[in-house]
Amino acid sequence: MEYLLSIAGYDPTGGAGVIRDILTFRKLGFYGMGVITTITYQNTKGFYGFEALDEKIVEREIEKIVEDFPIKYVKIGMVGKAADVILKFQRKYSWLTVADPLLEAKNSFPLNSLEDIEKIMERAYAITPNIPEAGKLSNVKIEKEEDILKAGKILLEKYGKYVIIKGGHGEGRDYLFGENVKFFQMPHLGKEVHGTGCAYSSALLGFIAKGYDMEEAFKEARKFVQREIERSIETGGYSLLP
């Protein structure tokens, strides 16, 4: 069995972060594991803050996992204080990583610092910003599709081998930047659902681990998230993935 690892934050609702990644890995047939970098305070009505674990705690978490399991594929979300520790293991074990920038929560609460996540993205196989994140990372004001194309090309030069700009903040069209630009669109369902970015990036990693080429993984990850959104659970605030 292939073991997939998430290094990310802990969301007590289970809607995002390490828990969502592990659920996604297991739905795709992998044994999913998680290393927690941050403890968050949130519910379905908002994000209220987080506490980052000391980097030595995160280092020990990772050490004990890699002593026991042959980790090859890793999804990285919130890094807290542990960016340098994560990079150390990333280099040592030549992990294939998918990095989700996670610059802000839905209510604009800051999550990853740009400096920290840039270090991670520079070594990533793929990065998965949404449209607002792509604008911030590229310094492009995104108002129309040609702005997304401009931002994606800038990010491709700066960061991972592949850049995927997710279209959930737009009309539901996703963009894959690699040797060429590819598009994939599904209907925007009009729901405010928590954790879709985490589910997308972890699903993408899963399909890559299954041996799909990047264009196939890009499309299948979106189809997976679309199915999850269709089955989302209504709550008192935003909806949760199943």
Image: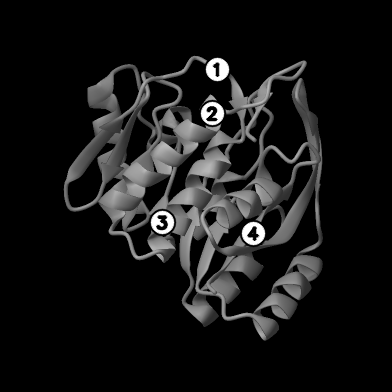
Is 217 left or right of 59, judged from the image as shown? left
Give me the residue at 81% from left, 68% from top.
57
Is 122 left or right of 112, judged from the image as shown? left
**Residue 93 screen position, x and y as percent:** 52, 80
Q: Which residue is mark 4?
A: 7
Tell me how far mark 4 sits from mark 3, CA to CA. Answer: 18 Å
Can residue 166 be seen?
yes
For residue 229, above or below residue 16: above
Dot in front, 2 or 4: 2
Quadrant of the image occupied by residue 167: top left
Give me the residue at 47% from left, 57% from top.
206
**Residue 66 screen position, x and y as percent:** 65, 79
Contact, mark 4 vs mark 3 (Cβ under 8 Å): no
Dot in front, 2 or 1: 2
Q: Residues within 10 Å of mark 3 (few under 14, many from 20)?
A: many
Mark found first going from the N terminus, 4 or 1: 4
Q: Which residue is mark 1?
A: 191
Q: What is the three-letter code of the residue carrying label 4?
A: Ile
**Residue nearer the viewer, 169 or 158:** 169
